[in-house]
Amino acid sequence: MAKAELQKTNKRVVVGIVILSLMAVLTVLSFVFYDEIYTVGGWFHSSPTGVAFIDAILGCAPSLFGSFQTLFITLLVLYLLKLILKKIFKGTPRRLTIGALALSISRVVVWVVCVIAILAIWGVDVAALIAGAGVLTLVIGLGMQSLIADVVAGVFLVCDGTLQVGDIVTIDGWRGTVQEIGIRNTKLINYSGDIRVANNSTIKIFVNQSRENSYPTVIVGVPYEENLQHVKEVFEANKQRIKEMCPAVVSDIDFNGVDSLSSSSVDLHFGATCKESDFFAAQRQMRGAIKTVFEENGIFVPFPQVDVHMPDQK
């Protein structure tokens, strides 16, 4: 599956390079042969074939050249904008977030200008179109209040600094890393690669777990017959070794006492501090290290047991 996706991606890259190369060639030709293409006495303005239908098609050539030229310049501007914004807004997560939002807004503006320029090349009255667009924008705005709310919410999320690219957050019970904050939605990606897209205006309450270190906890059961004081002494004697077996942990591991009395074991509560990105790794490492040390000292995690009491035959 991964190989097929890679081949598909490579094909798209090749097609994209071919199209861009063709557009670049047409753009260069339109500049080199500007007089022959665009002036009144050029190749396409003097009915070269004498056939009305063919001459009408050839008459569209200057507009086609102009459109390709505009598209190529637009793509070039977008590429340069991406490089410049990444160069300017690099470093801290806040700068990366502002850069991503600025890039999203820039893309919209550049493509709108591109569409207007192409319409002007084909002879559309752009001034009248822009004037009508003002009224149309008002009408559409009334019917697209949710979209406007998403845009405004996205700007405030970035300006407030409460949410940044790279933060690990929980939104509506879904935990993931902020991949992108766009002008309309925010993208999260979890540890398994799943991506969730949430509209900015719907992000009302969320938990940002990246600003401070986290405190993962684990529960380890011991038999009821085991002496708890002995268990504590074994843990304290091997505390440093357990920590060395847990590279994701950045603090001492705490023994917080008895968590519960379950049906088959006395459940002990352990915890430590780690980076939020290492939360699950720290839990797995603590469980394995504590179990290993306990078993080396004759303390075994019990399996589920059932006591059966037979009634007296009398």
Image (spheres, grey):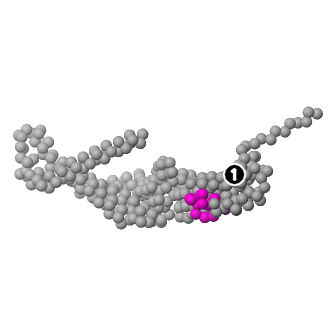
Most foreground residue, 258 or 83: 258
- Is 248 magenta? The answer is yes
**Residue under label 1:** 295
Decide if residue 140 is on the left or right side of residue 33. Answer: right
Q: Quadrant of residue 85?
A: bottom left
Write the residue at 65% across / 52% down.
292
Residue 35 visible: yes
Residue 263 locus on image (x, y percent): 75, 46
The magenta segment is: 242-254
- Left or right: 290 with respect to 131? right
Using residue 154 as the reference point, say whether residue 131 is left or right of it: left
Which residue is at 71% across, 44% downward? 303
Q: Is residue 121 visible?
A: no
Q: Nearer the viewer, residue 77 or 227?
A: 227
Instruction: Please check the rendered image and state whether residue 13 is part of the magenta-colored stretch, yes or no.
Output: no
Relative image position of residue 34 (x, y in whole percent): 11, 55
Name the outermost residue toward the top. 313
Q: Position of residue 219 (x, y in %)?
A: 67, 53
Give the prevailing secondary structure in the magenta stretch: loop
Q: Residue at x 41, y 51 (%)?
A: 143
Q: Nearer the viewer, residue 229 or 292?
A: 292
Is the N terminus in the top left, top right, bottom left or bottom right quadrant?
A: top left
Where residue 169 sits in the image (x, y, percent)?
53, 57
Q: Residue at x 33, y 56 (%)?
A: 108
Say how many tags the image has: 1
At label 1, the amino acid type is Glu
Q: On the rendered structure, is 228 left or right of 201?
A: right
SS label for mark 1: helix
What quarter of the picture does the C terminus occupy? Answer: top right
